[in-house]
Amino acid sequence: MAKLPEGFLWGGATAANQFEGGFAEGGKGVNSSDCTTRGSRTKPRMVTFKTKDGEVKAVPMFGMNVEEDVEYGVFEGYDYPSHQGIDFYHHYKEDIALFGEMGFKTFRLSINWARIFPTGMEETPNENGLKFYDDVFDELHKYNIEPLVTLSHYETPIGLSNTWESWVDARTIPCFERYVRTVGERYKGKCRYWLTFNEINIAAMSPWMSSGVGRNNPQVVADISKHQLIASAKAVLILHEIDPNNKVGNMVAYGANYPYTCNPADVLASKQRMHSYHFYEDVQARGYYPSYKLKEYEREGVEFSLTDEEKETLLKGTVDFLSISYYMSSVSSTDPEILKQVAEGNMGLGGLKNPYLKASDWGWAIDPTGLRIAINELWERYQKPVYIVENSLGTQDKLEEDKTCHDQAHIDYLRSHIEAMADAINIDGCEVMGYTPWGCIDLVSASTGEMHKRYGFIYVDYQDDGTGDGARYRKDSFYWWKKVIATNGEDLSNL
Ligand code: BGP
């Protein structure tokens, strides 16, 4: 196994709404994920709100399209998993010590925007919230762990959703700028690596999850995307102005896509499918809207324009690196018979079932070669460093009587993907900055809201039925990951 570049950023990734807890502590406001219930593989997560007549309702998060004027919020009788997360809020010292023990070089977390600006619209920040992250970042530095901070990871303050439909409205941009300037200045010197919007392309699939917006149609998605792309460019400019050492990246949910056959129509369909990923990267890395997207807006009757000032912002605020989450690949076809075989699961990302690949228990196609293809595509297209900030396998782990956990499936998945990434670096010559497996400590699933789908090197004893004391236990993969980091990826063998 070839060694990876010197200074390679190994670590792990999380998001506030999925692990932080401390829901009503330290003056934090409510965010979009806080209003989303626990689901399972077969039961959808629901979003709760009150209608104008005062009736409390819940609708499935995926596919929601709430046209009426409602007030999103938290109501009695519903189970909201973000409120507890895994209670990192009270366990951060213990958790960071465990990350330190594994030798993490970096740790990805998001700042919970509503902890800093409770409704998103305040003029002055909440000092208690700022202090919490000061303590977290100081603790990380004790172990020489570099924070990698996501500014917006499925955590839109609900005040913005209820006041002007959050990212549908351009007034959210200055609120975001204020937030970015506040945290950029406060954590100057403590945080150097930043990501703007987590999986910015998920807006097309779930405007609620990505942006706290309850409606979904092409115009809504175009408006959200425009405002977030401008806000992302402004964040790059602000963070560079505050500290020229800051490195700011974008983040896209990425996956290789294959034509089902060599029929040129399938090949074209596959290329067109890739536009859903490349659109955001094209704007964030090149600084302007690609022609295929403008033509699509014309065809769909979407109203779209940019002022000269907005164009200049996009052009100047391009990112320093590209980051992706990578879990699976997908398949495209134009054959109506084949199109009936839509793969189960895959969060809508997977499309058709690939007969050459096995899938996870949640139906996500396992494809390490797809990661090598993805890295190559990004490097060839943009010539900017690529950062794999999410990758791993959700599994149903069992804690044994003696408190061990034999999660060989995580080890196998990660090994095969690290080998593919190393080939992209050592054989293909791509530049990759680092690799932070998702959910390095067990946390709440974004798509299903369950604890039961576990990714971690560390088992956390919280269960979906509300039992568990939150105790942390090292899984087999904990010791394996420690060895991988210590050898800079050279030793990927089993323990
Ligand atoms: C990505 C999100 C993460 C994370 C991951 C795994 O889409 O950025 O927040 O949750 O997917 O997905 P899930 O939690 O649904 O298994």
Image (cartoon, grey):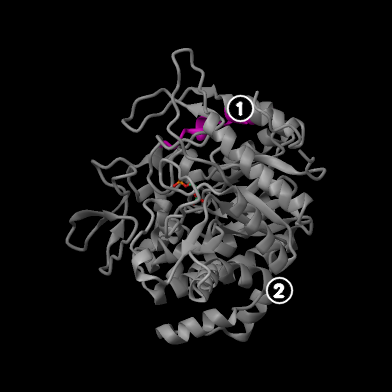
Question: In the shown orientation, is residue 154 left or right of residue 426?
Answer: left
Amino acid under label 1?
Phe
The vertical placement of 321 against 395, above or below, is below
Amino acid residing under circle 2: Lys
- What's drawn in magenta, residue-wise? 84-100
Which label sits on residue 19? none
> Which residue appears at 60% of the width and 65% of the height?
232
Image spot of residue 446 (x, y percent): 43, 47
What label does residue 478 carry, if any?
1
Residue 238 visible in this rendered orientation of the protein: no
Say few, some or many: other residues with alpha carbon within 10 Å of mark 1 (under 14 / 14 to 19 / 20 or more).
Answer: many
Classify mark 1 as within 8 Å of ligand 1 or not, answering yes or no.
Answer: no
Does 362 sit left or right of 254 as displayed? Answer: left
Secondary structure beneath dot 1 equals helix
- Please, is residue 106 above or below residue 406 in the view? below
Which image quarter is the N terminus in? top right
Q: Residue at x 63, y 81 (%)?
A: 311
Q: Position of residue 140 (x, y in %)?
A: 67, 35
- The residue carrying mark 2 is 316
Residue ranking furthest to the right: 6
Q: Residue at x 40, y 61 (%)?
A: 206
Percent from the top left, x then y, of residue 189? Answer: 75, 47
Where disc 2 sits, the SS reads helix
**Is residue 94 on the magenta stretch?**
yes
